[in-house]
Amino acid sequence: MTASADDGIGVPVQDRERVGFIGLGHMGAPMAARLIDAGYDVTVWSRTAAHAGDLVARGATRADSPGDAIATGHLFSMLASEDVLREVLPPGLLGAAPPGFIHVNHATISVRAAEEFAAGAARGGYGYVAAPVLGRPGVAAAGALTIMAAGAPEAVEASVPMLAVMGRRVWRYGAVASAANLAKICVNYLIAHALQALAESITLLERNGLDTGQFVEMINDSVFPGPVYGGYGDAIARGSYTPAGFSAVLGLKDVMLAVGAAADTGVNLPCAPVLREIFETTAAQAGDDLDWAAIAEFTRQRTVP
């Protein structure tokens, strides 16, 4: 089998750099595909074995266990939460990694967990890079993610070529791994505010008989261009929240990550209790089925007719 950076053809297998990828959900699968298409010899593993099928057909090697992916020496993971990370990649397993091993963790996790994983890597003598991402599955498939990277400088440097394949820009946040996670938490907390602001403004317009679609188009063409106010604004105006690119349950998790980070540093977030209530109610009602923009229905349903 051969591969090249453009079409998977031209580079002998023995000359391809080996990497592992664990976590092949909506985000992980297209990210791993980018590495395959760029010519890397990618060993993939997922808790749901069927998720690996398309990537194997694309040229990846199927791992029988997480250990097989770790054995490549350079592991990328996109797992759902810090609890899943602890389950799939326990310290003992990571401690048995080959010399020079680097773990690049793309998950959105708490600052405390990031510090825990970085400390574990330091004790185990391997490199750890926190590299959370911004962007939905389509953005990942296009290799246009925004990636925040932090950790031991040599580990970050060694990972940048792969990160550059998956993202349009890599933002470096220094040698403290948790800094990248805090940046991601703050971005998602900001988006949570934007969703609620859109919900309130659009509901106010609706109750006064105005064209909310035109309003969303206008703000996206002027003061708020971009995917948040454009994409989510359109979804809220239409009341369309499927398929869920990012669920309300995950939105609640990220709001609580911001609450936890604030509590750890003595920062008061005045809006946090309101957002928490809104996301808790929406998550309880919608589960994983609806996009987190569905929090707009909380405002719609509680507005006096």
Image (cartoon, rainbow, N blue to C red):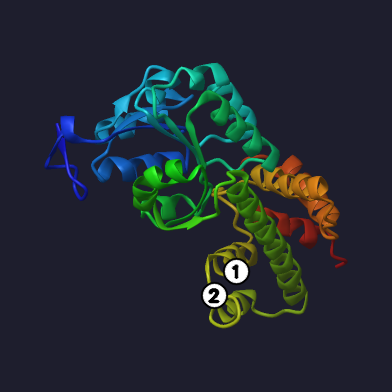
Q: Nearer the viewer, residue 264 or 224?
A: 264
Question: How far apart, in angstroms, are the residues tagged by discs 2 and 1?
Answer: 7 Å
Q: Nearer the viewer, residue 152 or 292?
A: 152
Q: Toward which corner of the image does residue 204 lie, by quadrant?
A: bottom right
Residue in the image at 46% along x and 17% along y: 96
Q: Is residue 32 visible?
A: yes
Vertical comparison of 72 with 148: above or below:
above
Vertical comparison of 179 with 73: above or below:
below
**Drawn side of residue 169 relative to residue 128, left or right:** left
Residue type, mark 1 in image: Tyr
Residue 268 image label: none
Residue 229 image label: 1
Residue in the image at 82% along x and 60% along y: 271
Residue in the image at 82% along x and 55% along y: 267
Q: Where does residue 162 sit, x and y in percent of width and height?
A: 35, 45
For disc 2, the marked residue is 225
Residue at the limit of the structure toward the right, as seen here = 304
Circles 2, 1 touching at the beta carbon (< 8 Å): yes
Quarter placement of the C terminus: bottom right
Residue type, mark 2 in image: Pro
Q: Nearer the viewer, residue 120 or 257?
A: 120
> Helix, strand or loop at disc 1?
helix
Q: Nearer the viewer, residue 292 or 272?
A: 272
Q: Is residue 291 visible?
A: no
